[in-house]
Amino acid sequence: MRLAIVTKSLLGLICYIGLGAEADEQPILSLPLTGSHSCTQGEHGATSHNGSSTMYDLDLDTPNNTAEDPDDPLDVLAAAPGRAYGFDGCEFGTTGCNSGWGNYAKIFHGAGKYTIYAHLESVAQEIIDLMPDGLLVPRGYVIGQEGSTGNSVNKDGSRADHIHFGLHGGDPLGDSSGTSIP
């Protein structure tokens, strides 16, 4: 069994991570961005994602990663329904903010599994307002905007806008990362 992460177009198959529906079955998770995006970091990435907490997570490139004007961020969408929690207070350049995740959201899907969406420019205010109880959201709900907060800079110190996305196990309100699920 594999967990397929796909866009809504036929040519949109982007990446796989290892659990859930077969590739020809309905995906369990949808891609948290509209359009096509490359995986700039994946399983056992060379520059990050080493160790059990993030080794199976994905970095999904966004147009603002190369844009000179990041003032039009993409919406980040819930990959599956669940209870959303948000953590904010970070700006670009605050690499240690929220344990390096920057502004991020987690969506608890039950059975000890949650998705994480990190380095956001912002988290939806209605999610922040309902902490610590969280907000029930459907698949496709706008949970924030892509950005470059926390440990999200290029080698030259410039913005590295992307979405760090992963399926984790553990308590979504416990430690900041839980365990990355293959």
Image (cartoon, rainbow, N blue to C red):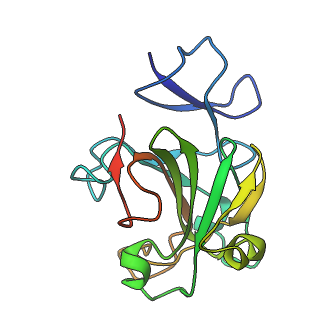
Q: Is residue 12 above or below residue 124?
A: above
Give coordinates of residue 128: x percent, y percent.
67, 76
Name the residue located 23 percent from the left edge and 53 percent from the top edge.
50
Is residue 43 among what the camera can see? yes
Name the residue located 53 percent from the left edge and 85 percent from the top edge.
92
Judge by depth and name the residue closer to the eye, 171 or 44: 171
Location of the N terminus (image quadrant): top left
Judge by depth and name the residue closer to the eye, 15 or 55: 55
Judge by depth and name the residue closer to the eye, 96 or 45: 96
Name the residue located 35 percent from the left edge and 66 percent from the top edge.
175
Q: Quadrant of residue 104?
A: bottom right
Location of the C terminus (image quadrant): top left
Give coordinates of residue 116: x percent, y percent.
51, 55
Judge by depth and name the residue closer to the eye, 109 or 53: 109
Q: Is residue 147 above or below residue 38?
A: below
Q: Is residue 154 above or below residue 61?
A: below
Q: Quadrant of residue 112?
A: top left
136 relative to 94 in the view: left or right: right
Give coordinates of residue 113: x percent, y percent.
47, 43
Give coordinates of residue 108: x percent, y percent.
56, 50
- Of all residues, the one furthest to the front in this rendering is 133
179 relative to 35 in the view: left or right: left
Is residue 72 among what the camera can see? no
